[in-house]
Amino acid sequence: MVVVVVLKVATVVMVVMVMVLLIQLIVVVVVVVAAAAEAVVVVVAVVVVVVEELVVGVKVVMLTV
């Protein structure tokens, strides 16, 4: 009888530990995705700025010519 109770408790503890590990993994994945999204936003912003500078440069060149 005692053995069965111990086994059940052990099973519950294992399940809880697995759940906690899964939650930690999900949190890590979310953080990584957020960091990646932030990096993408920064890259897009830089590209936009560069393109704007190029457009302005082309306009200036065309005006001087």
Image (cartoon, rainbow, N blue to C red):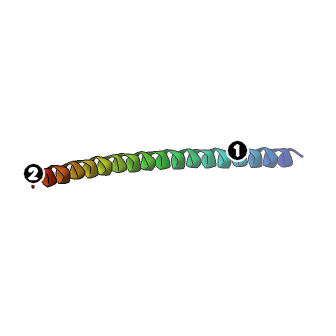
Q: Residue at x 86, y 44 (%)?
A: 2
Amino acid carrying mark 2 in the image: Thr
Residue toward you, 2 or 39? 39
Circles 1, 2 touching at the beta carbon (< 8 Å): no
* Residue 37 picture location, percent across and down: 45, 48
Q: Is residue 64 left or right of residue 34?
A: left
Q: Is residue 34 left or right of residue 60?
A: right
Return the mark for residue 16.
1
Q: Which residue is mark 2?
A: 64
* Residue 56 picture location, percent across and down: 21, 48
Residue toward you, 53 or 22? 53
Return the mark for residue 51.
none
Q: Quadrant of the C terminus?
A: bottom left
Residue toward you, 65 or 54? 65
Q: Nearer the viewer, mark 1 or mark 2?
A: 2
Q: Residue at x 70, y 48 (%)?
A: 14
Q: Residue furthest left?
A: 64
For mark 1, give the secondary structure. Answer: helix
Crowding at label 2, few (<14), some or many (≥20) Cα neighbours within 10 Å?
A: few
Task: Measure how far apart labels 1 and 2 are at the Cα level.
Answer: 72 Å
Q: How many marks?
A: 2
Residue toward you, 17 or 43? 43
For mark 2, give the secondary structure. Answer: helix
Amino acid carrying mark 1 in the image: Val
Q: Residue at x 78, y 44 (%)?
A: 9
* Residue 27 picture location, percent across and down: 56, 44
Crowding at label 1, few (<14), some or many (≥20) Cα neighbours within 10 Å?
A: few
Which of pointers 1 and 2 lies earlier in the amino acid sequence? 1
* Residue 49 picture location, percent across and down: 28, 46
Residue 6 in which image quadrant? top right
